[in-house]
Amino acid sequence: MTHRFFVAPDSIRGDAVFFSAAQAHQLRAVLRMRAGQEILVLDNRGGEYRVALRDILPDRARGEIIERRAARGEPATQIYLYQALLKADKLEWVLQKGTEVGIAAFTPIHAARAVTHGASQQKFARWMQIVTEAAEQAGRGKIPRLQTLQALDAALAAAQTDGGKIFILWENETAWDLRRALDDAPTQTLHLFVGPEGGWSASEIEMAQAYGARSVTLGPRILRAETAAIVAASAIFFARGEMQRAAE
């Protein structure tokens, strides 16, 4: 298994890569790596580097770049997930699995029927750690963006301004399934709104539609909120050919 680490772009200087104290500790004490061993480094801009470790000290580490290439883990289709707040463990699962699948950005949102209504700075720090570690594990070229908690109307307005197509998953939709909606939306930017455990209220669906969102169904089976987000994202990527391994 090749270990992957994201570093800030300014940590790459020429052919040298400098790691933070926390990363040095992980390399030395947790992974027990030694000079000469190789890892993959990602610059969060789409670049991937094969790096040979040179110095691993308790508070810092340095590596040497031996190959540069474009990261292969980023899909062309950009899915921005707006997930209504869920119970902590469920939302963390969505962040982790959504990152692995390929979601580009996460925005937690308020919803009328959500069972939780707040997010502390400590929660955001934990969420960011989950997203970063999942991106490293999955071979992503970029860490998905994690936005601050927003009201539904503000999130819809931002999605409308960004362009692309807005989908809101709704179990009561009968006319538009995801396949048909995708065929009618030849764009690489998709804004996906997923409700809380209790589902969207009728007024929330009306609000979304007023902002240009299309309500879509995932079929006859009722999925849990955390399941719906991952199923929808995976189906979109599959339909767009993003689940195939790229040619070497």
Image: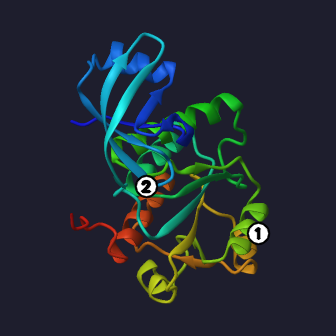
2 and 1 marks in contact (CB < 8 Å)? no
The residue sitting at 24% across, 64% down in the picture is 245
Q: What element carries label 1?
A: helix
Q: Which of 220 and 80 is in front in this view?
A: 80
Q: Is residue 174 left or right of residue 138?
A: right
Q: Hey, which quadrant is residue 163 in on the image?
A: bottom right
The residue sitting at 31% across, 26% down in the picture is 53
Q: Which of 86 and 23 is in front in this view?
A: 23
Visible residue check, residue 210: yes
Residue 45's mark? none
The residue sitting at 50% across, 18% down in the picture is 21
* Residue position for label 2: 227
Which quadrant does the N terminus fall into?
Answer: top left
Q: In this view, does 246 lie above or below 64?
A: below
Mark 2, Cα crowd under 10 Å, few <14 / some 14-19 / many 20+, is some
Tell me how many marks there are: 2
Q: What element carries label 2?
A: helix
Q: Is residue 54 left or right of residue 192?
A: left
Q: First in sequence: mark 2 or mark 1? A: 1
Instruction: Give the colouring mode of the picture.
Output: rainbow
Which amino acid type is marked by label 1? Ala
* Residue position for label 1: 157
